[in-house]
Image (spheres, helix red, strand yellow):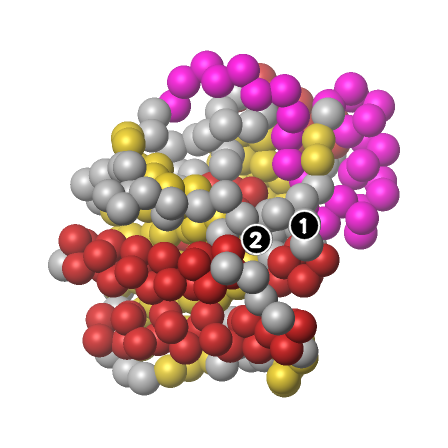
Amino acid sequence: MVEKYLKNVLVASKKIFTLIQNGLDESYFDVIKVGAGGDKSTKIDLVSEEIYIKYLKSFGQIISEESGIIGEGEEKIILDPIDGSDNLISGFPYYGSSIAIKKDNLTIFSFIANFANGDFFVKSDDFYKKGNLYFEDFNLKDIEIKEYKGRIGLFEKAYANPKIVKALKDNYIKFRSPGAVALSLSYAHNVRFVLFAGKIREYDIAAGLHQCVDLNLYYNDKYILVSKSKELFDKIRKDVLKD
């Protein structure tokens, strides 16, 4: 079944990736409605959702940030059709999609794509791989935890948390705030850490958390913190989050 998930997810994602890469006219940025997750849904959000629904609806019930619950089934598909919509609309190249498939409340498959550069990350119980949507064979390669010399961390929602920003600065911890939570979590194996502080919704984190289970991971109803380095992980919890 995992192979079928992956095949269909890749076909759907390649269609959305190609659509975006070919250039979107201004109508795709028009707000159509307020989505189930509470954010404004644009035409590109809804078109992407429609494509994913076509290829995923046979696997179970879809729970989408845009339209809420779609269909029925034992397996639950948590979908954010466009992660980082504001970035896409603004021409900032950091946006994608995230999908988590759950069975008996356990995530058994996750997929996160970056539609700006084609990167995607896919994980199941049997494999964890990275590929690129530019390639016909998707160029799948295994992901490993290694001493990657990343120099920055990623702090999502930094603009809304000035005290944490100051604490990071005071501790000489360098970061960026790119604005797409799932996508940032997918890059956690490359960067020094990923931190999110704010309202946590399942659409934003289900796939990302699944892909970070082999790292140092902490989350509650206010924060998510991920890092390869136990030393840095403990320092941020103690000196930045005061946890």
Helix, strand or loop for disc 2: loop
Helix, strand or loop for disc 1: loop
Q: Position of residue 12 (x, y in %)?
A: 33, 64
What span is colored magenta in the figure?
A: 145-173
Q: Is residue 179 visible?
A: yes
From the image, tell me which residue sits under label 1.
92
Report the amino acid beneath label 1: Phe
The residue under the point 46% across, 15% down is 147
Q: Is residue 220 visible?
A: no
The mark lying in front, picked from 2 and 1, is 1
The residue under the point 28% across, 70% down is 56
From the image, tell me which residue sits under label 2.
95
Report the amino acid beneath label 2: Tyr
Q: Tell whether 214 sits left or right of 19.
A: left
Q: Report the front residue among 7 and 203.
A: 7
Q: Position of residue 209 (x, y in %)?
A: 45, 47
The residue under the point 30% across, 56% down is 10
